[in-house]
């Protein structure tokens, strides 16, 4: 089945230019063409344009009602395994191939970014990579583990640095060996008749379910882990000595927790930030490899950080 977005099939009309084509062709942000195509196809879908405006207020009202109801529920009440089975079932049957592909990619990319920071730290720390091969693999409490991994990594990294009296700093020789493209293909995602739901609509629908079936601590941690985008961005920028790339981070200020009502939108931004940071690391990896070849050949060395974003 041809998954080429409509905006790439249509001829350019200067009287009625496609905003999606403009965003696809724009190279100001670091994203691979296949990722950008899938992202914009998802964003320009009928589900995103016509269904999401109705789903969002309903989902946020549901979050408020669940929060009130959970006052009367034991604090330890949790059904994580059932939650993840329901999420995997919903993703396989109702969510678009592009959205499912981006969701699976996110686990791989996030794991690689944490491994990059952990390995290039002056006090190296191990990580627990999450690399689901398909949607069924998400049943292994993958979403919950993703949030736990992030906070545990920040704690382990900074504990190791403090114990040695060190601070994160520019790496003398940056190790990019863990950065690679995940072995996931868009064409392998479920493509049934009902697989139409866009990424943000799916997130808005699943967020109240996430809140309902996890403890308050788990849900709060999941919602506020998104603001750690700034923290992870600072870690990477420090190692690379490239603070200008922090402009790509939009979820910020983890010391000021935000309301969980906008967690759905912030989760989409979190996914985009992860994609951009990973793409940036890939480009720097290629630049480093090219610099090594030039040096071996006796040619002038290419400076790693002179590479453009696109």
Image: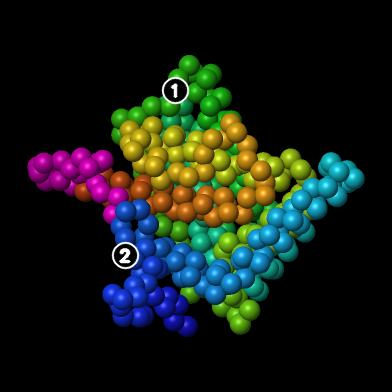
Other residues around mark 1 within 10 Å, as few (<14) / some (14–19) / many (≥20): few
Give the vertical position of 83 relative to 215 (above or below).
below
Name which residue lies at 22% across and 42% down. 306
251 or 177: nearer the viewer: 251
49 or 305: nearer the viewer: 49
Where is residue 45 drawn, in percent x and y? 52, 73
Q: Look at the image and say whether residue 293 sits in the magenta stretch.
A: yes
The image quadrant of residue 119 is top left
Q: Is residue 68 left or right of residue 208?
A: right
Give the vertical position of 175 relative to 1 (above or below).
above
**Residue interval drawn in magenta:** 291-310
Residue occupied by mark 1: 167
Q: Is residue 279 left or right of residue 206?
A: left
Name which residue lies at 88% across and 46% down. 73
Of circles 1 and 2, the one toward us is 2
Where is residue 38 drawn, in percent x and y? 45, 67
Query: Which dot marks residue 25?
Result: 2
Q: Look at the image and say whether residue 215 sits in the magenta stretch.
A: no
Give the vertical position of 159 relative to 205 (above or below).
above
Please give the count of numbered marks on the rendered protein.
2
Tell me the element at label 1.
loop
Residue 96 appears in view: no
137 or 60: nearer the viewer: 60
Q: Is residue 110 left or right of residue 92?
A: left
Q: First in sequence, mark 1 or 2: give its number.
A: 2
The image quadrant of residue 60 is bottom right
Q: Residue furthest right?
A: 72
Tell me the element at label 2.
helix
Task: Tell me the distance, in whole angstroms, between the alpha carbons under discs 1 and 2.
Answer: 40 Å
Name which residue lies at 53% across and 30% down. 157
């Amino acid at each position: 089945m041809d998954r080429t977005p409509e905006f790439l099939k249509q001829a350019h009309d200067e009287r009625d230019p496609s905003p999606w084509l403009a965003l696809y062709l724009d190279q100001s942000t670091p994203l691979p063409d296949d990722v950008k195509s899938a992202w914009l196809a998802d964003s320009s879908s009928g589900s995103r344009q016509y269904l999401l405006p109705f789903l969002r207020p309903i989902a946020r009202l549901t979050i408020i009602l669940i929060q009130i109801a959970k006052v009367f529920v034991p604090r330890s009440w949790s059904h994580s395994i059932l939650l993840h089975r329901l999420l995997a079932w919903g993703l396989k049957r109702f969510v678009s191939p592009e959205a499912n592909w981006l969701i699976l990619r996110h686990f791989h990319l996030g794991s690689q970014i944490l491994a990059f920071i952990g390995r290039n730290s002056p006090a190296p720390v191990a990580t627990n990579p999450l690399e689901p091969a398909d949607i069924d693999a998400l049943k292994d409490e993958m979403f919950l583990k993703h949030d736990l991994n992030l906070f545990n990594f920040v704690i382990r990294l900074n504990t190791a640095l403090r114990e040695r009296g060190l601070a994160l700093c520019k790496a003398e020789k940056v190790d990019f060996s863990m950065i690679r493209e995940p072995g996931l293909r868009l064409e392998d995602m479920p493509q049934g008749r009902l697989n139409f739901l866009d990424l943000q609509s799916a997130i808005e629908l699943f967020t109240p379910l996430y809140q309902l079936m996890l403890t308050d601590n788990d849900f709060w941690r999941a919602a506020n882990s998104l603001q750690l985008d700034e923290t992870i961005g600072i870690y990477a920028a420090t190692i690379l000595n490239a603070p200008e790339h922090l402009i790509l981070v939009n979820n910020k200020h983890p010391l000021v927790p935000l309301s969980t009502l906008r967690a759905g939108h912030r989760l989409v931004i979190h996914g985009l930030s992860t994609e951009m940071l990973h793409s940036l690391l890939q480009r720097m990896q290629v630049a480093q490899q090219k610099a090594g070849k030039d040096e071996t050949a006796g040619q002038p060395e290419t400076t790693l950080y002179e590479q453009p974003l696109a």
